[in-house]
Amino acid sequence: MGSEELVQQDAPRVRGRLQVLVLHGRQSNANLANFQISGLKTAFGKDTDFEFLEGDVTWAYRPGVDLHDADPMSVNLSKGKDFKVWFNHTTDDPRERPDLYKQQDPGVCVSYEGVEGAVDALLQRVTQEPVDAVVGLFEGCIVVHLAAARLLLDGATLPWPVSVFFGDLPIRDARWASAFDNAKAKHASIHVFGRNDEYYHYGRRAAGMMAPEDYYEAPLVLEHVEGHRLPQLQPEAGALYTRVAREVRNCCGRLVQDGTSDLHRWLRTSRPLKPLSPPLLEMELMVPRKLRVLALTGGHSCTEVLRFQCANLQQALGRDACEWTYIEGTEDWNWFEGEPIVSDMEKTLAKGAQLKNWYMDSITEATPTEKPNREKQFDPASRVVYHKIPEKVEKLKELIFEEGPFDVVVAFSQGCIMMHLLIGHLRKEDPSAQKAKRWHHTRNSPEEMPWRLSVFFNGMHIRDQDYMHLFETPSPHPTVHIFGKADEFYDYGRDGFGYKPQEEYYEDPLIFTHEEGHNFPTQPPRSRQIYSRVASEVWRRCGGRPP
């Protein structure tokens, strides 16, 4: 039997008034929930009764676990009621970090305590008197999912026609989540997410487990642009609530004004794509912020040159949507025979500034010759040694950890090699050993970099054999590589010289080429195509382009 047939068969007879049961979120209560759903109540109208079910566990603020204490407005709206949670939980995470980050870490096991009582309370209430719809708010959604899991294992269906989930959250206890491994609940469900909610990525990706929208046969996924709250911004919020009310009435057998009776027409509606990463938020206040880009110069360069080089990419990303930080190496560079010649434009842009390298190196040939340094570099038989790399890596890492979070790293030429070295070193370190700034806690494993995407222009591979082991296995870190085919370093940059090419350092590199030389592309239409594609990938990896 299809889900559409099932709901039509199981839909209750139309009674005089619509009955909606609401389950509050974590750190909440019936009074606060009643205020939160005021817009939803308006959309349903006066012929709908709302009832609130409360959890039994009293909540108390725990520093270092909760992100914040109850705010004055929530205290006032609660009108003296205690704040409640539905159940407690434990994790196997030894790191001292807020519970939010533990829950969102795919490597952490979560165990629920006292959920049976919460599920019993819900199922007992809906069997006492018929309910047309259950609305879950945040943690209240999990209780509904747990009830669905129990009923699915018992071979039963949910005894109400439709559920609505605002700020939906997944089941993280694998013992309960396993109920959905081989079957879905035959139940109509509406899942509403805020794209700027700190739980948005978690709610739709479930930290490596099954997402809650995938527990059900007939999910409708709706999104709004706000954060961790029920939508308030008009007119979008009103339109969303009206849509929810209409769909609930349909599922309960109540026809909308146009006489539509296709209860599950949303099955033919495409879901919004699941996000690849969380939204861009200021970690202390959990409010939207601009994209933060860290840009590294190449060798024999300076930040003023880099600003000019990045101008087209900056334009493609949106000048008002990003904050850029430009950094240069710490080693003074001076020209000598065999080194690249600085162009007149580079001299003008540098404005007399000392040009810098990220590191210095030395080259030993198998058979010593008088060849220029560049030719020695291009000889696979030459032994290249980078100097003071541990010191350089540590300095760059400290800058990122102290000045971050950054979302994207853009590097040019030698700056790309420096970033390969940093990524290679970071993937060998335990992230829990870092200083405990809040944003550091979002890094869950050594393979997860403290930024989301790296973009390499005219990059090159690691030549020092002492550091080739850093990429014995490919890194899952997302990267974009742009090469100029007329670049004198093109063949060299895409070779591995007996090891592996730099693009093979990463599991799924995105690669673009153009017909220019050792520079950021400038010649349209290809340059515009590349910057547009790079910008799209940046926003895809960073929560979506802002409206």
Image: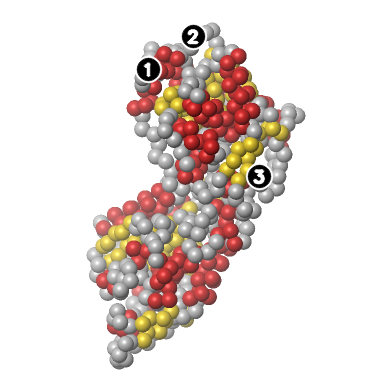
Image quarter hosting the N terminus: top left
Is label 1 in contact with label 2 (beta carbons under 8 Å)? no
Q: Say which residue appears at 55% left-offset and 52% top-offset.
A: 442
The numbered mark at residue 494 is none
Q: Residue at x 49, y 44 (%)?
A: 207
Q: Which residue is mark 2?
A: 14
Q: Are marks 3 and 1 in contact (CB under 8 Å)?
A: no
Q: Does any portion of residue 19 appear in the rendered image?
A: no
Quarter occupied by the C terminus = top left
Sequence-wise, which precedes: disc 2 or disc 3?
A: 2
* Three-letter code for the amino acid on which mark 2 is drawn: Val
Image location (x, y in percent) of residue 460: 35, 70
What secondary structure is marked by label 2?
Answer: loop
* Residue ID for mark 3: 66
Residue 5 image label: 1
Query: What's the residue type where badge 3 is placed?
Result: Asp
